[in-house]
Image (tube, grey):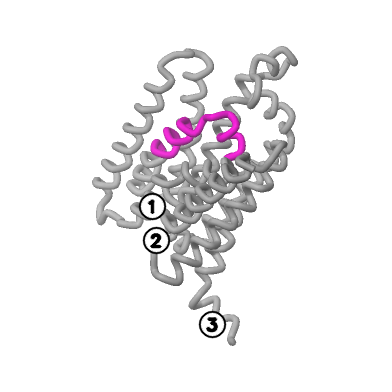
Amino acid sequence: MDISAFFENYGFITNSIIAVVLSSIAAGITGTFVVVKKISYIGGGIAHAVMGGLGIAYFIGVNPIYGALVFSVFAAILIGYVKLKLKQNEDTMISALWAVGMATGIIFAYLTPGYNVNLLSFLFGNVLMISTENLWLLLILDLIIAAFVFVYYKQLIFITFDEEYAAVRGINVNLLTILLLIMVALTIVILVQTVGLILVIALLTLPSAIAGMFSNTLYKMILLSIALILLFSLSGLALAFSVNLPSGASIILMAGAGYILALAGKTIARSY
């Protein structure tokens, strides 16, 4: 087979697989902290606020992912500030960001001349259409997330399990909490292209929840989460490509099925 002809006709498959691998690394690392620290609802607020950045980026004619990146980081910092400083109305702030972000995105998408329907792919995900430029951005974000966790791994463990003890040990809990939320925001931007805004929290939490059933350390949980997300993503991608189904929904179906099987297996194992 002519290699150049293959990449000309099926290069999108290669890009999709690379995107899935990069997404698995980010989601496996971040999802572990999201599940253990029980902040999935914060991730949901950030994810839906991203829609505002996507809509504005389309309106001014730049790569929508850059708009998503700015909005997600802003939402993470704002939620973190409310959580740490005001210590009240946190759920109200998250709900407001959720609604305002979605509304802003819809309005700017409507105002965009010749409205581009590709914006819908960010709602439901379409990894088969990912560009090479966005792959490079995913790689950079992956490296940032991995480097942050590598450098602050012990401190992150402390603030994840016991913030008061972490403060007693002299750890800057507030700063690390904000940085952790920013890490969640960066991961959401990565996953938006894989499964979309609507389904992003499922991929961020389900595999990590499965990994938590069979891991006794955070490090093992991260590695197992990455492996599971990669498994679910590749199998979902194969299903979508073979029978012409939406890729994002197919991936989440695999993750959901995996969670049900793991839960059933764990329950049966306990009975014995």
- Label 2 SS: loop
> Which percent across, then down, holds residue 37?
58, 29
Q: In which quarter of the image is residue 104?
A: top left
Callout in the foreground (2, 3)? 2
Q: Is residue 208 magenta?
A: no
> Which percent across, then down, holds residue 91?
41, 22
Of residues 253 and 108, the one nearer the viewer is: 253
Q: In this view, does 158 lie to the left or right of 137?
A: right
Q: Which residues lie in the magenta part?
A: 30-49
Q: Quadrant of residue 187?
A: top right
Identify the residue position indicated by label 2 in the image: 246
Q: What residue type is labelled 1?
A: Phe
Picture quarter with the N terminus: bottom right
- Label 1 SS: helix
Q: Is residue 196 above or below residue 246?
A: above
Mark yes or no: residue 258 visible: yes
Q: Do the residues labelled 2 and 1 touch (CB within 8 Å)?
A: yes
Q: Which amino acid does label 3 sit on?
A: Ala
Q: Which residue lies furthest to the front in this view?
A: 272
- Looking at marks 1 and 3 on the same chain, the residue that comes earlier in the sequence is marked by 3
Q: Label 1: few (<14), some or many (≥20) within 10 Å? A: many
Q: Which amino acid does label 2 sit on?
A: Pro
Q: Provide the major secondary structure of the magenta segment.
A: helix
Q: Which residue is drawn at 44% across and 55% down?
A: 248
Identify the residue position indicated by label 3 in the image: 5
- Label 3 SS: helix
Give me the C-alpha separation between circle 2 and circle 3: 26 Å
Mark yes or no: residue 29 visible: no
Identify the residue position indicated by label 1 in the image: 124
Q: Label 2: few (<14), some or many (≥20) within 10 Å? A: many
Of residues 147 and 25, the one nearer the viewer is: 25
Q: In this view, does 133 lie above or below 90?
A: below
